[in-house]
Image (tube, rainbow, N blue to C red):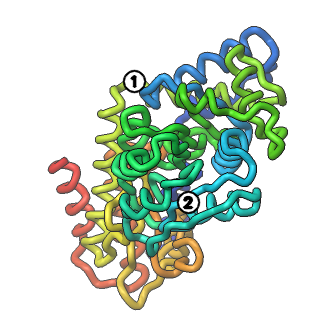
Protein backbone atom coordinates (compact mmCIF):
# COMPACT_ATOMS: atom_id res chain seq x y z
CA UNK A 1 0.00 0.00 0.00
CA UNK A 2 1.39 3.42 -0.96
CA UNK A 3 1.49 6.46 1.30
CA UNK A 4 -1.15 8.03 -0.94
CA UNK A 5 -3.69 5.35 -0.07
CA UNK A 6 -4.78 7.17 3.07
CA UNK A 7 -5.56 10.45 1.27
CA UNK A 8 -9.27 9.77 0.62
CA UNK A 9 -9.71 9.47 4.39
CA UNK A 10 -8.25 12.92 5.06
CA UNK A 11 -10.64 15.48 6.42
CA UNK A 12 -10.88 18.48 4.12
CA UNK A 13 -9.45 21.46 5.95
CA UNK A 14 -9.43 25.15 5.18
CA UNK A 15 -6.01 26.30 6.37
CA UNK A 16 -6.03 29.42 4.20
CA UNK A 17 -6.58 32.96 5.49
CA UNK A 18 -10.20 33.05 4.36
CA UNK A 19 -12.71 31.69 3.83
CA UNK A 20 -12.10 29.86 7.09
CA UNK A 21 -13.41 26.90 9.04
CA UNK A 22 -16.67 27.63 10.87
CA UNK A 23 -18.19 25.91 13.89
CA UNK A 24 -21.02 23.35 13.68
CA UNK A 25 -23.20 25.75 15.68
CA UNK A 26 -22.64 28.44 13.07
CA UNK A 27 -23.63 26.10 10.25
CA UNK A 28 -26.70 24.91 12.15
CA UNK A 29 -27.90 28.49 12.52
CA UNK A 30 -28.03 28.69 8.72
CA UNK A 31 -30.17 25.54 8.59
CA UNK A 32 -33.04 27.12 10.52
CA UNK A 33 -36.35 27.61 8.68
CA UNK A 34 -36.12 30.71 6.51
CA UNK A 35 -36.50 33.80 8.66
CA UNK A 36 -37.74 37.21 7.52
CA UNK A 37 -35.65 40.29 8.15
CA UNK A 38 -38.75 42.52 8.59
CA UNK A 39 -40.32 40.27 11.24
CA UNK A 40 -39.89 41.45 14.85
CA UNK A 41 -37.47 38.61 15.62
CA UNK A 42 -35.45 39.44 12.50
CA UNK A 43 -35.13 43.09 13.51
CA UNK A 44 -34.23 42.10 17.05
CA UNK A 45 -31.54 39.73 15.77
CA UNK A 46 -30.07 42.46 13.58
CA UNK A 47 -29.87 44.90 16.49
CA UNK A 48 -28.37 42.24 18.76
CA UNK A 49 -25.64 41.30 16.27
CA UNK A 50 -24.70 44.95 15.64
CA UNK A 51 -24.30 45.46 19.39
CA UNK A 52 -22.24 42.29 19.75
CA UNK A 53 -19.93 43.29 16.91
CA UNK A 54 -19.27 46.58 18.71
CA UNK A 55 -18.66 44.62 21.91
CA UNK A 56 -16.02 42.53 20.12
CA UNK A 57 -14.46 45.74 18.78
CA UNK A 58 -14.32 47.05 22.34
CA UNK A 59 -15.33 50.65 21.62
CA UNK A 60 -18.76 52.31 21.28
CA UNK A 61 -18.53 52.58 17.50
CA UNK A 62 -21.70 52.18 15.42
CA UNK A 63 -21.62 48.99 13.36
CA UNK A 64 -23.10 48.76 9.88
CA UNK A 65 -23.56 45.27 8.41
CA UNK A 66 -23.19 45.17 4.63
CA UNK A 67 -24.40 42.26 2.52
CA UNK A 68 -21.20 41.87 0.52
CA UNK A 69 -17.51 41.21 1.02
CA UNK A 70 -14.98 43.28 2.94
CA UNK A 71 -14.22 45.09 -0.33
CA UNK A 72 -17.86 46.19 -0.57
CA UNK A 73 -17.72 47.37 3.03
CA UNK A 74 -14.55 49.36 2.34
CA UNK A 75 -16.06 50.97 -0.76
CA UNK A 76 -19.15 51.90 1.24
CA UNK A 77 -17.01 53.45 3.97
CA UNK A 78 -15.05 55.46 1.42
CA UNK A 79 -17.93 56.87 -0.65
CA UNK A 80 -20.08 57.52 2.42
CA UNK A 81 -17.48 59.54 4.30
CA UNK A 82 -15.07 61.17 1.82
CA UNK A 83 -16.35 64.00 -0.43
CA UNK A 84 -15.91 63.80 -4.19
CA UNK A 85 -12.45 64.82 -5.39
CA UNK A 86 -10.91 64.96 -1.91
CA UNK A 87 -7.27 64.02 -1.34
CA UNK A 88 -6.84 60.48 -0.09
CA UNK A 89 -3.48 59.16 1.09
CA UNK A 90 -3.07 55.41 0.68
CA UNK A 91 -0.38 53.51 2.58
CA UNK A 92 0.47 50.16 1.00
CA UNK A 93 2.93 47.29 1.23
CA UNK A 94 0.92 44.45 -0.28
CA UNK A 95 -1.95 43.44 -2.57
CA UNK A 96 -4.90 44.41 -0.41
CA UNK A 97 -3.58 47.80 0.66
CA UNK A 98 -2.85 48.56 -3.02
CA UNK A 99 -6.49 47.75 -3.78
CA UNK A 100 -7.75 50.69 -1.75
CA UNK A 101 -5.63 53.12 -3.79
CA UNK A 102 -6.91 51.59 -7.03
CA UNK A 103 -10.47 51.88 -5.72
CA UNK A 104 -10.06 55.51 -4.67
CA UNK A 105 -8.55 56.47 -8.04
CA UNK A 106 -11.38 54.81 -9.96
CA UNK A 107 -13.90 56.68 -7.80
CA UNK A 108 -12.31 59.99 -8.74
CA UNK A 109 -10.43 60.90 -5.58
CA UNK A 110 -7.03 62.59 -5.68
CA UNK A 111 -4.77 59.80 -4.46
CA UNK A 112 -1.26 60.01 -3.02
CA UNK A 113 0.42 56.63 -2.61
CA UNK A 114 2.96 55.97 0.15
CA UNK A 115 4.49 52.58 -0.59
CA UNK A 116 6.89 50.05 0.87
CA UNK A 117 8.06 46.77 -0.70
CA UNK A 118 5.83 43.78 0.04
CA UNK A 119 6.62 42.18 3.38
CA UNK A 120 8.23 45.30 4.84
CA UNK A 121 6.59 47.50 7.47
CA UNK A 122 5.03 50.87 6.72
CA UNK A 123 6.84 53.91 8.07
CA UNK A 124 4.70 56.15 10.30
CA UNK A 125 6.67 59.35 9.64
CA UNK A 126 6.57 58.97 5.86
CA UNK A 127 2.82 58.43 5.94
CA UNK A 128 2.27 61.36 8.29
CA UNK A 129 4.23 63.70 6.02
CA UNK A 130 1.90 62.88 3.13
CA UNK A 131 -1.22 63.45 5.25
CA UNK A 132 -0.74 67.12 6.10
CA UNK A 133 -3.32 68.37 3.59
CA UNK A 134 -5.30 65.15 3.10
CA UNK A 135 -8.94 64.50 3.88
CA UNK A 136 -8.52 60.78 4.50
CA UNK A 137 -5.94 58.04 4.99
CA UNK A 138 -6.66 54.47 3.88
CA UNK A 139 -4.47 51.85 5.47
CA UNK A 140 -4.37 48.10 6.06
CA UNK A 141 -3.64 46.77 9.55
CA UNK A 142 -3.02 43.08 8.80
CA UNK A 143 -1.83 42.59 5.21
CA UNK A 144 -3.08 39.14 4.18
CA UNK A 145 -0.90 38.98 1.06
CA UNK A 146 2.37 39.31 3.00
CA UNK A 147 1.53 38.25 6.55
CA UNK A 148 2.69 41.61 7.92
CA UNK A 149 1.03 43.31 10.88
CA UNK A 150 1.60 47.05 10.54
CA UNK A 151 1.88 49.34 13.56
CA UNK A 152 -1.53 50.94 13.12
CA UNK A 153 -1.32 52.73 16.46
CA UNK A 154 1.96 54.50 15.66
CA UNK A 155 0.86 55.37 12.12
CA UNK A 156 -2.50 56.78 13.19
CA UNK A 157 -1.03 58.84 16.00
CA UNK A 158 1.72 60.26 13.77
CA UNK A 159 -0.78 61.16 11.05
CA UNK A 160 -3.23 62.77 13.48
CA UNK A 161 -0.39 64.77 15.02
CA UNK A 162 0.14 66.63 11.72
CA UNK A 163 -3.53 66.66 10.68
CA UNK A 164 -6.01 66.33 13.56
CA UNK A 165 -8.99 66.42 11.17
CA UNK A 166 -7.68 63.52 9.09
CA UNK A 167 -10.22 60.73 8.61
CA UNK A 168 -8.50 57.35 9.02
CA UNK A 169 -10.18 54.38 7.34
CA UNK A 170 -8.53 51.12 8.40
CA UNK A 171 -8.79 47.79 6.63
CA UNK A 172 -8.98 45.42 9.61
CA UNK A 173 -10.40 42.58 7.55
CA UNK A 174 -8.02 40.00 9.04
CA UNK A 175 -7.19 41.75 12.32
CA UNK A 176 -10.67 42.31 13.76
CA UNK A 177 -11.26 39.68 16.44
CA UNK A 178 -7.74 38.35 15.89
CA UNK A 179 -5.11 40.97 16.75
CA UNK A 180 -4.92 43.77 19.30
CA UNK A 181 -7.11 46.55 17.95
CA UNK A 182 -8.02 49.63 20.00
CA UNK A 183 -9.49 52.11 17.51
CA UNK A 184 -10.61 54.81 19.94
CA UNK A 185 -7.29 54.95 21.79
CA UNK A 186 -5.31 54.82 18.55
CA UNK A 187 -7.35 57.44 16.68
CA UNK A 188 -8.93 55.21 14.03
CA UNK A 189 -12.15 56.74 12.71
CA UNK A 190 -13.55 53.91 10.58
CA UNK A 191 -12.83 50.17 10.88
CA UNK A 192 -13.70 47.71 8.09
CA UNK A 193 -13.87 43.91 8.28
CA UNK A 194 -15.72 40.88 6.92
CA UNK A 195 -17.47 37.71 8.03
CA UNK A 196 -15.22 35.05 6.47
CA UNK A 197 -12.15 35.96 8.52
CA UNK A 198 -11.76 36.39 12.29
CA UNK A 199 -15.46 36.12 13.04
CA UNK A 200 -15.47 32.60 11.52
CA UNK A 201 -18.71 32.93 9.54
CA UNK A 202 -19.32 32.00 5.89
CA UNK A 203 -18.54 34.71 3.31
CA UNK A 204 -21.14 37.33 2.50
CA UNK A 205 -21.11 40.01 5.21
CA UNK A 206 -18.94 43.09 5.55
CA UNK A 207 -18.73 45.25 8.66
CA UNK A 208 -18.04 48.97 8.98
CA UNK A 209 -17.59 50.60 12.38
CA UNK A 210 -17.92 54.39 12.69
CA UNK A 211 -16.52 56.35 15.61
CA UNK A 212 -18.88 58.99 17.06
CA UNK A 213 -16.90 61.70 15.25
CA UNK A 214 -16.87 59.79 11.95
CA UNK A 215 -20.62 59.31 12.19
CA UNK A 216 -21.11 63.10 12.15
CA UNK A 217 -19.07 63.33 8.94
CA UNK A 218 -21.13 60.82 6.96
CA UNK A 219 -22.38 62.24 3.65
CA UNK A 220 -26.14 62.38 3.22
CA UNK A 221 -27.27 60.98 -0.14
CA UNK A 222 -23.72 60.36 -1.33
CA UNK A 223 -23.58 60.75 -5.13
CA UNK A 224 -21.08 57.88 -5.37
CA UNK A 225 -23.21 55.16 -3.82
CA UNK A 226 -26.78 53.92 -3.62
CA UNK A 227 -26.61 50.35 -2.38
CA UNK A 228 -23.47 51.30 -0.43
CA UNK A 229 -24.88 54.53 1.05
CA UNK A 230 -23.89 53.74 4.63
CA UNK A 231 -25.37 56.93 6.08
CA UNK A 232 -28.77 55.65 5.00
CA UNK A 233 -27.88 52.14 6.12
CA UNK A 234 -26.83 53.27 9.58
CA UNK A 235 -30.01 55.27 10.07
CA UNK A 236 -32.09 52.19 9.34
CA UNK A 237 -29.91 49.63 11.10
CA UNK A 238 -30.13 51.47 14.42
CA UNK A 239 -33.79 50.39 14.35
CA UNK A 240 -33.07 46.90 13.06
CA UNK A 241 -34.07 47.88 9.54
CA UNK A 242 -32.20 47.90 6.23
CA UNK A 243 -32.94 49.75 2.97
CA UNK A 244 -32.23 46.56 1.02
CA UNK A 245 -32.74 42.88 1.78
CA UNK A 246 -29.89 41.72 4.02
CA UNK A 247 -28.38 38.23 4.15
CA UNK A 248 -30.39 37.53 7.29
CA UNK A 249 -29.39 33.85 7.40
CA UNK A 250 -25.75 34.92 7.66
CA UNK A 251 -26.67 37.37 10.42
CA UNK A 252 -28.10 34.46 12.43
CA UNK A 253 -24.93 32.47 11.73
CA UNK A 254 -22.77 35.39 12.83
CA UNK A 255 -24.66 35.60 16.10
CA UNK A 256 -23.82 31.93 16.76
CA UNK A 257 -20.14 32.49 15.89
CA UNK A 258 -19.97 35.49 18.23
CA UNK A 259 -21.00 33.28 21.17
CA UNK A 260 -17.57 31.67 21.09
CA UNK A 261 -15.60 34.85 20.44
CA UNK A 262 -17.29 36.77 23.24
CA UNK A 263 -16.94 33.92 25.76
CA UNK A 264 -13.48 35.20 26.77
CA UNK A 265 -11.93 38.67 27.17
CA UNK A 266 -10.60 40.11 23.92
CA UNK A 267 -7.06 39.94 25.28
CA UNK A 268 -7.37 36.16 25.66
CA UNK A 269 -8.65 35.86 22.10
CA UNK A 270 -5.79 37.99 20.76
CA UNK A 271 -3.21 36.00 22.73
CA UNK A 272 -4.50 32.66 21.47
CA UNK A 273 -4.44 33.73 17.83
CA UNK A 274 -0.92 35.13 18.22
CA UNK A 275 0.13 31.85 19.82
CA UNK A 276 -1.28 29.83 16.94
CA UNK A 277 0.44 32.00 14.34
CA UNK A 278 3.76 31.77 16.18
CA UNK A 279 3.42 27.98 16.16
CA UNK A 280 2.88 27.96 12.39
CA UNK A 281 5.89 30.21 11.83
CA UNK A 282 8.02 28.03 14.11
CA UNK A 283 6.96 24.91 12.21
CA UNK A 284 7.76 26.51 8.86
CA UNK A 285 11.11 27.80 10.08
CA UNK A 286 12.07 24.31 11.30
CA UNK A 287 11.41 23.03 7.78
CA UNK A 288 13.46 25.78 6.14
CA UNK A 289 10.44 27.94 5.32
CA UNK A 290 10.73 31.12 7.43
CA UNK A 291 8.22 33.96 7.65
CA UNK A 292 8.25 36.49 4.83
CA UNK A 293 6.91 39.37 6.94
CA UNK A 294 9.01 41.70 9.05
CA UNK A 295 6.34 41.48 11.79
CA UNK A 296 4.03 38.47 11.62
CA UNK A 297 0.28 38.97 11.79
CA UNK A 298 -1.68 36.61 14.06
CA UNK A 299 -4.05 36.12 11.14
CA UNK A 300 -1.75 34.36 8.69
CA UNK A 301 1.70 32.79 8.37
CA UNK A 302 3.20 33.70 5.00
CA UNK A 303 6.19 31.40 4.57
CA UNK A 304 9.05 31.30 2.08
CA UNK A 305 9.65 27.69 0.95
CA UNK A 306 13.19 26.32 0.70
CA UNK A 307 14.79 26.42 -2.73
CA UNK A 308 14.11 25.16 -5.31
CA UNK A 309 10.47 24.89 -4.19
CA UNK A 310 7.98 27.61 -5.03
CA UNK A 311 4.86 28.64 -3.17
CA UNK A 312 2.58 27.18 -5.80
CA UNK A 313 4.17 23.73 -5.48
CA UNK A 314 3.62 23.70 -1.72
CA UNK A 315 0.01 24.86 -2.03
CA UNK A 316 -0.64 22.26 -4.74
CA UNK A 317 0.84 19.45 -2.62
CA UNK A 318 -1.31 20.49 0.34
CA UNK A 319 -4.36 20.47 -1.94
CA UNK A 320 -3.55 16.90 -3.01
CA UNK A 321 -3.73 16.06 0.70
CA UNK A 322 -7.15 17.78 0.94
CA UNK A 323 -5.66 20.72 2.86
CA UNK A 324 -6.63 24.03 1.25
CA UNK A 325 -3.85 26.59 1.67
CA UNK A 326 -2.86 29.39 -0.71
CA UNK A 327 0.21 30.44 -2.68
CA UNK A 328 1.18 34.10 -2.70
CA UNK A 329 -0.66 36.92 -4.43
CA UNK A 330 0.51 38.05 -7.86
CA UNK A 331 3.22 38.99 -8.67
CA UNK A 332 4.58 36.94 -5.74
CA UNK A 333 2.38 33.87 -6.18
CA UNK A 334 5.40 31.57 -6.36
CA UNK A 335 7.50 33.37 -3.74
CA UNK A 336 5.52 32.21 -0.69
CA UNK A 337 2.66 30.06 0.53
CA UNK A 338 0.06 31.08 3.10
CA UNK A 339 -1.42 29.06 5.97
CA UNK A 340 -3.67 30.14 8.81
CA UNK A 341 -5.75 29.26 11.86
CA UNK A 342 -7.78 32.44 11.39
CA UNK A 343 -11.25 30.97 11.89
CA UNK A 344 -12.73 28.22 14.05
CA UNK A 345 -9.42 26.77 15.25
CA UNK A 346 -7.42 26.38 18.44
CA UNK A 347 -3.80 25.83 19.42
CA UNK A 348 -4.06 22.10 18.77
CA UNK A 349 -5.07 22.77 15.16
CA UNK A 350 -1.75 24.62 14.80
CA UNK A 351 0.02 21.43 15.91
CA UNK A 352 -1.94 19.45 13.32
CA UNK A 353 -0.92 21.86 10.58
CA UNK A 354 2.71 21.46 11.64
CA UNK A 355 2.37 17.71 11.06
CA UNK A 356 0.59 18.30 7.77
CA UNK A 357 3.48 20.50 6.64
CA UNK A 358 5.92 17.72 7.45
CA UNK A 359 4.00 15.28 5.26
CA UNK A 360 3.75 17.82 2.43
CA UNK A 361 7.44 18.71 2.52
CA UNK A 362 8.42 15.03 2.72
CA UNK A 363 6.33 14.36 -0.38
CA UNK A 364 8.10 17.24 -2.11
CA UNK A 365 11.53 15.77 -1.33
CA UNK A 366 12.64 18.23 1.34
CA UNK A 367 15.11 16.60 3.77
CA UNK A 368 14.45 17.15 7.48
CA UNK A 369 14.39 15.26 10.76
CA UNK A 370 10.97 13.72 11.34
CA UNK A 371 8.96 15.53 14.02
CA UNK A 372 11.01 18.73 13.88
CA UNK A 373 8.11 20.96 12.79
CA UNK A 374 5.68 19.57 15.37
CA UNK A 375 8.27 19.94 18.13
CA UNK A 376 8.97 23.54 17.09
CA UNK A 377 5.28 24.38 17.03
CA UNK A 378 4.70 22.79 20.43
CA UNK A 379 7.67 24.66 21.88
CA UNK A 380 6.30 27.96 20.56
CA UNK A 381 2.95 27.25 22.21
CA UNK A 382 4.49 26.28 25.52
CA UNK A 383 6.67 29.38 25.57
CA UNK A 384 3.68 31.58 24.81
Task: Tell me residue 177's x, y (percent).
Answer: 44, 38
The residue at the point 59 percent across, 38 percent down is 201
Instruction: State the mark number for residue 206.
Output: none
Q: Residue furthest left?
A: 383
Calculate the distance from the C-alpha at mark 1 to the C-alpha at mark 2.
36 Å
- The mark total stands at 2
Q: Is residue 50 left or right of residue 344?
A: right
Q: Residues within 10 Å of mark 1 (few under 14, many from 20)?
A: few
The residue at the point 71 percent across, 39 percent down is 80
Nearer the observer, 256 or 166:
166
Q: Residue furthest top?
A: 40
From this view, report whether residue 215 is shown above or below residue 362.
above
Residue 222, picture quadrant: top right
Nearer the observer, 180 or 215:
215
From this view, report whether residue 222 is shown above or below residue 11.
above
The residue under label 2 is: 90
One can see residue 121 in this view: yes
Counting residues from the start of the chain, the first of labels 1 and 2 encountered is: 2
Single out the mark in the foreground, 1 or 2.
2
Task: Tell me residue 204's x, y (percent).
Answer: 70, 42
Q: Does dot 2 land on a helix, a strand or a loop?
A: strand
Q: Is residue 232 left or right of residue 367?
A: right
Q: Does dot 1 land on a helix, a strand or a loop?
A: loop
Proximity of marks 1 and 2: CB atoms separated by less than 8 Å = no
Amino acid sequence: MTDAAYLPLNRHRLIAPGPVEVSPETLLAMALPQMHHRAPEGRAKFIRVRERLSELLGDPYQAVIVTGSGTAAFEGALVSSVPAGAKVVNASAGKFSERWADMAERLGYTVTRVEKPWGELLDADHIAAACQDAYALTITHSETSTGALHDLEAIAQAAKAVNPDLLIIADCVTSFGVSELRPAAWGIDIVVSGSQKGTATPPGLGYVFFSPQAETRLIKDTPKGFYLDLQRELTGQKKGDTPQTPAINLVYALDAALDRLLSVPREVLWHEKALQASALVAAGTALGAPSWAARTSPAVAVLTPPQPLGGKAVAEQLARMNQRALPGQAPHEDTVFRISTLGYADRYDALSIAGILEDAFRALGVPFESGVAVQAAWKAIQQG
